[in-house]
Amino acid sequence: MKIKRITAILLSTAICCSLIAGCGDSTTPSSESSSETTASAAATSEATTASTSDAAASATSTVTDEATTTDAAAASSVDSKYTADDSVLSEPEGEKSSDDKETERPDFSGNITNNDGKQLQIVFLGDSQLDNFRDITGPAYLTGQYCEANVYNLAIGGQTLSIDHNDNPSSGEWTSPSGVGWAYVLSGKVDADFLSSYHAYDVYKSCNLNDTDVFVVEYGVNDYLSKHPLWGGYDSDPYSYAGAINIVINTLRNTYPNAKIIFSTPSYVYFTSANSVLGTGDGNLINNGYATLSDYSYGASNTAQKIGAETYNAYQLLGVGPENYDEFLLDGIHLNEDGRKKLAQAWSRM
């Protein structure tokens, strides 16, 4: 709009100048004088038009430069949020420890650590933050060590808490190794054989679940990466992250009423190869089409607290963020040894 107004004003000036240049004495000029006057008017008009064009071009350039500067400033703003493409929303394979069954569960020789005069038993459900590290640096092992507890790690890397849109919860044959799937297995609603290809299945077969004092449920980053919606059409919608939280916590509570349930949200993530608009991005910035990972974590925390589960918002409380992520993350998503130690300490305090 500014360009159009500038151009209109300059063109009007040019026309006025042309008319003035074409005006002469009130007497009729001679043929020669008329020709000279006409030529002079034409030259003046041409010069004025050229000047007008230059002025308009200059004005256009100025406005365009201002717009470009404004766009660049907006794009670089840390408060901006954008929807990432699928190339950004992918989980790196991450570092993995060896599957060492002997070191994953420390033996405390029957130390009495729970209220019933037995050794405390903790069962973990989760994703690769737990499954990738089944050695003495893993969060499950470290939590067991700090609490002198017997631990069973049923985590499966890459899994979501909610079920995928291709899964049919009403079918007779359950196939989803999700958090919802594990809750149904632990409650006896479905048979566990569909999990037989996972290491967690062997751990499950060795566990007496009725002795469980605490369930730690840690999921969410894969729900976000897989673009499973944060909120569903109803409270227990299994296709949504919040709906799955309702299902899993209520199912475990109804099956094991004496066990404490701790729900742990995803922690901070930083994408090192992000959408080209901003270059890099993190869980505060990148929207998967439904919300940011920060939104997922706060939504999960609120949902779990609302239904009475003890909740640890790792995104908010773990102490990993934009200022220090390189100190605690292996690949932008998975926690390194120092990060895993911080997480285990937080769980142990609960």
Image (cartoon, rainbow, N blue to C red):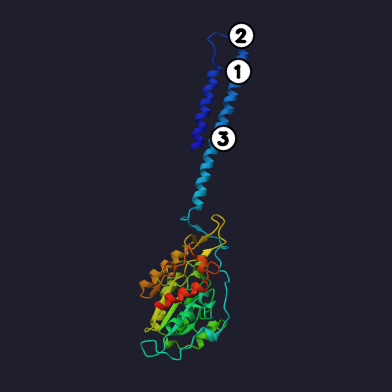
Name which of mark 2 and mark 3 comes first in the sequence: 2
| Image marks 2 and 3: residues in contact by CB distance under 8 Å | no
Mark 2 to mark 3 CA distance (whole Å): 40 Å
Q: Cβ–Cβ below 8 Å for labels 2 and 1?
A: no
Closer to the N terminus: mark 1 or mark 3? 1
Q: Residues within 10 Å of mark 3 (few under 14, many from 20)?
A: some
Viewer-closest of 306 and 164: 306
* Left or right relative to 74: residue 112: left
> Residue 114: where, in percent of width, then height?
38, 86
Instruction: Indicate the secondary structure of the residue bearing disc 2.
Output: loop
Kindly identify the amino acid type of the residue bearing the numbered disc 3. Ala
Question: How far apart in space, not on screen, are marks 2 and 1 (Cα)?
Answer: 15 Å
| Residue at x 54% of width, y 63% of height | 271
> Left or right: 218 with respect to 53?
left
Q: Mark 2: which amino acid? A: Ser
Amino acid type of the residue tagged 1 in the rendering = Ser
Give the structural element (helix, strand or loop) at label 3.
helix
**As drawn, 105 above or below 59:** below
Residue under circle 3? 57
Q: Residue 30, labelled with which disc?
A: 2
In the picture, the disc for residue 40 is: 1
